[in-house]
Amino acid sequence: MASQPSGAGSKRPKRTSVWLQPVKEQRSEPPLSRERIVAAAVELLDSEGIEGLTMRRLAERLGSGVMSLYWHVDNKEDVFDLALDSALEYRGPPQVAESRDWRNEVVHMLEDWRANMLRHPWSASLLERPAFGPNVLGRLELLSRTLSRAGVPDADLNVSIWSLYNYVMGATIARASLDLSDDDRAVGQQRLTRLRDLYPTLERTRLLLDNDWDGVFRKGLDFLLDGLAPRR
Amino acid sequence: MASQPSGAGSKRPKRTSVWLQPVKEQRSEPPLSRERIVAAAVELLDSEGIEGLTMRRLAERLGSGVMSLYWHVDNKEDVFDLALDSALEYRGPPQVAESRDWRNEVVHMLEDWRANMLRHPWSASLLERPAFGPNVLGRLELLSRTLSRAGVPDADLNVSIWSLYNYVMGATIARASLDLSDDDRAVGQQRLTRLRDLYPTLERTRLLLDNDWDGVFRKGLDFLLDGLAPRR
DNA sequence: CGATTGACTAGTACGTCGTACGATTCTATC
DNA sequence: GATAGAATCGTACGACGTACTAGTCAATCG
């Protein structure tokens, strides 16, 4: 009755007589490792979304048994945490060495941060958890150092960093959650039109439609930086 | 073999001879309704967290069968959406009638928004989804109207609103995700201390510790409002 | 050389979840 | 009473995370 579970990956050996099998199943796959698991998880998340990542599917994609994953990883939460951080690597601004313009450096890193998260939309769903892996810490350190060099006094440093962090995360989440399908968008607008009496201003300015997300992000960021920049 | 499932709620009638049962089981509970379901869901989320909300537990708390819920609600996602919006009701600023100070009005509403979400920490985990129920729309409409009255031209209105929205959501999520237990906090700091070489600035400013979240929120908000306010 | 050990892989099984389905009960109307 | 829709709910199914346990393999040691 029970057939091969999903049919796609024919890697797992079919059950045949022992005598017919080669002495050693050639394993083309490299052995499992934390890195391979995380990489496969990111792939799976990218292609199937956050609901699509299950330990079974992950194992299938890796050509391994499900429980083998648990040797390298404590639980599924770990996989999420590792995948999130791994999607947030940062290589620094394009120029060589130190840029003299701290503001450009900050903007570049933060825009890259946001871009990375939008490239992996599932990452926005994972923000709730305390996610401070090496890549995130590295970005914060860079931010910290750049602002400090730019003249922000230590007393204001944390406020500045957290304000920027808050803003970037909020912009990313909002952007991700408003990325509706065209159908949803149409339905939403219809609903809004019907409720014109309750939300006249929203209807007038078409807040929920056609927004220039990137532009909004840049402008808000500029306002913040204006406010945070060392007073002259 | 199968015993009574969880033992707690002894409301469900035990299987006894038909002849011994009263003609009509008295039902002390009021009938189900979308409103009751949502209210119970919020209670459950508040007390057990986001993982604690299951349809079975929800039904148990309502003294109903699990599948009865599905008459009032399409699926579990609906319950989340409804619960989120219901936690975000806003009654307006304390003063009577119109306040003359648009800025106070905006700050009050946004601080209340954040406070509501922090009072229901699970709400931060739900931000990923497009969550525009009546209460959120009402808040956006209020924001929109207030800024418009304050003199923000229509062309800048959406940018302003989204910047503020982004900021509030980000601040809330960051705050919620950094609300570590004391143990986690200690572990985190130890880890950071060990990695002093990699993250010297973070270690120096103790970024991940003892932060004045409310203060940071207010200051960043002020910066944004300064930037967004109609130029003079 | 065989025995031992520890790193790693994996099958089976358990408890829990969301919910499809169909039967049942309730309430209102004729 | 008969009928019909509204509302309730028990059973069952497939999928999930993962505990437990047995297995494989390579390196090490006698």
Image: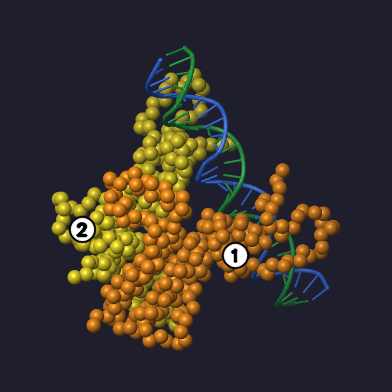
Chain colours: A orange, B yellow, C blue, D green
Residue A98, picture quadrant = bottom left
In the displayed structure image, the side of residue B2 where residue C9 appears, left or right: right
In percent of width and height, residue A202 lies at 31, 53
Identify which amino acid the numbered label 1 is placed on: Ala
Quarter the C terminus of chain B occupies: bottom left
Q: Which residue is mark 1?
A: A40
Q: What SS does tag 1 mark?
A: helix
Q: Which residue is mark 2?
A: B149
Q: Residue at x 34, y 78 (%)?
A: B205
Choose mark 2 or mark 1, whichever is in front.
2
Residue B151, picture quadrant = bottom left
Residue A34 vertical placement versus B57 (above, below): below
Q: Residue at x 36, y 55 (%)?
A: A208
In percent of width and height, residue B81 lies at 40, 48
Identify which amino acid the numbered label 2 is placed on: Arg
Q: Are marks 2 and 1 on the same chain?
A: no
In percent of width and height, residue B80 lies at 41, 48
* Of residues A154 and B9, the one drawn nearer to the viewer in this rendering: A154
